[in-house]
Amino acid sequence: MKITAIEIKHYLLPLDPPFKAAWDPLPRKKFPATIVRVSTDEGITGIGSGDAMLGLAGHEHLFIGQDPFEIERHWQVLDNIDFHYGRCWPLDIALWDIMGKAGGQSIAKLLDAQKFKILAYASSGEMLAPQERAERVQKLSDQGFKALKIRFHHPDPREDIKVVESVRKAVGDSLEIMVDANQGWKMPWDTGAPWDFERACQVAQALEDLNIYWLEEPLPHYDFRGLARLRQKTKIRIAGGEMNRRWHDFKEMNTLGSLDVYQPDVVLTGGITGVRQIAGWVQHKGIWFSPHTWSNGIGLMANLQLACAVSQCPFLEFPFDPPAWTPQRRDYMLHPEDRLMIDRSGYLHVPEKPGLGCELDEKALSRYEVNTVYIGEP
Ligand SMILES: [Mg+2]
């Protein structure tokens, strides 16, 4: 099989009302998506998405005429592009989609998965008052969710802790609660300072009494030693690494013992090909791998396929915070019947369709196509 064409297109979904992501100082009025379509001489097309893929344009010739199955070679070229330009890993996803479709099996099956479902944790996006958050969590529990993640971003983290207290009081120990401090990285226009080590320690200590499942990104993404020190000081699991882009970072963090839960996302760090390897290293040491999935429906699906195949962590991130963040928004590029939702027991299932397991909603997408990449509010 040979790759015959690579096409990259950009889309913008208007968000009305805007989405107020806890980690973004600006309300989001649009939701961009870049989708790559890879065609082959056998009529199979693969799709990928989840990053703007800046820098792939102009490098298509490095893949055209090649066999999509030579994935380690393609990983090396994408890793070189990642060094010079953007995170073009959605192309790796599209190649796995082709490989799965060629063999008539899901990517998870291709990766030798022994399980095809995983418990989802509802990953919230907004910051809400304690009572309102507790009410939303009650609804999640009624829907079947067994875990959820709360965002911290108040200037004073004691305000955030009040939200966790309110949720814990409402649901007791029936749900696991994760906390995401979102201190690892910032949007380009965010000039605020991240937490320092003392603040991270104080928050971790306060959360210990609330039986928190993990504390995510309490320190900047490069503070490998600070994270390792914090991990020694608290009983709570420390999670992170969602935006660390080089596999060397994960090798170093794993050597230093920085984290209990490593969260590389296949569309942002190394593709399925690279993240599978990272998951192997960290889990060899008895540490969890549980990918970040907050990009879009295609990115979520790609991470679901890998997580089912290799993750030893019981939960997978499921971006879901209705009415602010819904499958309709998150998965707008997907055919409505391919949009992901949990079953009544809280599980996400790998679709039975081959490859990635989802089809594009071309009709809807044609309404949202734009010529340029959307970077942020002008
Ligand atoms: Mg996170």
Image (cartoon, rainbow, N blue to C red):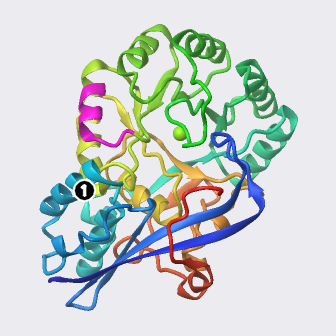
Q: What is the crowding at mark 1: few (fewer than 14 residues within 10 Å), some, or many (at least 20)? A: some
Residue 34 in the image: state x and y as whole percent: 47, 68
Relative placement, left or right, of 166 versus 345 is right
Look at the magenta stretch and give its main secondary structure: helix
Image coords of residue 284 (percent x, y): 24, 33
Say what amino acid the circle numbered 1 marks. Ile
Residue 255, percent from left and from top: 24, 22
Q: Is residue 251 left or right of residue 317?
A: left
Residue 68 is at least partly visible in this image: no
Residue in view at x 57 percent, y 81 percent = 365
Q: Say which quarter of the image contains residue 110.
A: bottom left
71 and 368: which is toward the camera = 368
Element marked by disc 1: helix
Which quarter of the image is occupied by the N terminus? bottom left
Q: Kindly identify the residue that appears in the image at 66 percent across and 66 percent down.
A: 329
Is 307 displayed left or right of 17 in the figure?
Answer: left
Q: Is residue 52 above or below residue 102?
A: above
**Residue on which the image places disc 1:** 81
Q: Which residues are magenta?
A: 244-253
